[in-house]
Amino acid sequence: MYRLDMNCDLGESFGAYKLGNDEQILDVVTSCNIACGFHAGDAATMRKTVAMALEKGVAIGAHPGLQDLVGFGRRNMDISPQEAHDIVVYQIGALYGFVRAQGGKMQHVKAHGALYNMAAVNAGLAEAIAEAVYKVDPELILFGLSGSELIRAGQKIGLRTASEVFADRTYQENGTLTPRRRPDAMIEDTDKAVAQVIRMVKEGKVRSQQGVDVAIQADTVCIHGDGPHALEFARHIRQALTDAGITVQAVGRSA
């Protein structure tokens, strides 16, 4: 039986600035990663997003990022493993408070943007992030790019991990995502995105930009919620997965 979690990055509004289609996207996905105030989000947004997720039965995760509001956490920063550990603990704690205050339970942690991508290839950063998650709550599930250092670090320390794949991103032959600055980084064609996801789930493979198949584990798929057609795209992906005989449910509820 094939299973797949659908996750989306949410809670990215900040002050007077509104981003994404959070309420509508929550009707489609099974897990959400809520920004914790460093790359996006603020206290009020965290509270509201947690409330909506609990109301709709969507599993909640912390989405810690680099302290870079201007760059939306997508610019690499030269931080030490200790700094990575500390900012992850800090941000998990912030969201954990809002989840606990509203009677909920946090399911997972997924690093954001540049922090996520750096930890995918940097073992020191990956181990620091995994240690931070484990120390806060060893029951939390660590999300990471399939085949990455983050997944290895999580497994090594004893965390349950969820290997993440992307519907609308292209891959390199080493298993990493094509950098966003490149024109071929995104998949705009919905049918191609659907086909890529289904193949990753059923065959455990993805075709890289170099034309080589890369082995991949697909436990959860990221659906970006901030594009102009994000909601339509998310609905299409979910229906296609169901039609392909893939059960869509949160990773914490699939055991």
Image: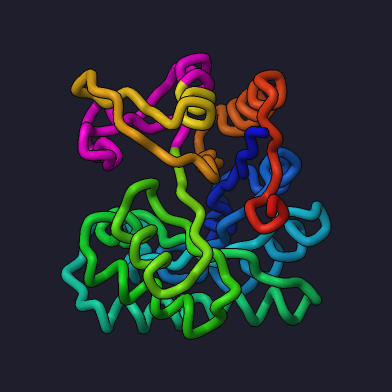
Would you place residue 221 above or below residue 75 in this image? Answer: above
Q: Position of residue 24 (x, y in %)?
A: 72, 41
Would you place residue 109 above or below residue 101 in this image? Answer: above
Instruction: Say left or right for 37 vs 232.
Output: left
Please check the rendered image and state whether residue 206 is part of the magenta-colored stretch, yes or no. Answer: no
* Figure quadrant of the N terminus: top right
Instruction: Kindly identify the residue that appears in the image at 36 percent across and 54 percent down.
Output: 113
**Which region of the structure is painted magenta?**
166-195
Instruction: Kindly identify the residue that appears in the image at 20 percent across and 66 percent down.
Output: 77
Is there any visible trace of residue 36 in the rendered image?
Answer: yes
Q: Position of residue 151 (x, y in %)?
A: 38, 58
How many numbered markers are drawn? 0
Please check the rendered image and state whether residue 176 is part of the magenta-colored stretch, yes or no. Answer: yes
User: Looking at the image, which is closer to me, 116 or 130?
Assistant: 130
Q: Position of residue 123 (x, y in %)?
A: 23, 66
Instruction: Say left or right for 203 vs 81.
Output: right
Instruction: Say left or right for 5 vs 190.
Output: right
Would you place residue 45 above or below residue 244 in this image? Answer: below
Q: Position of residue 31 (x, y in %)?
A: 64, 52
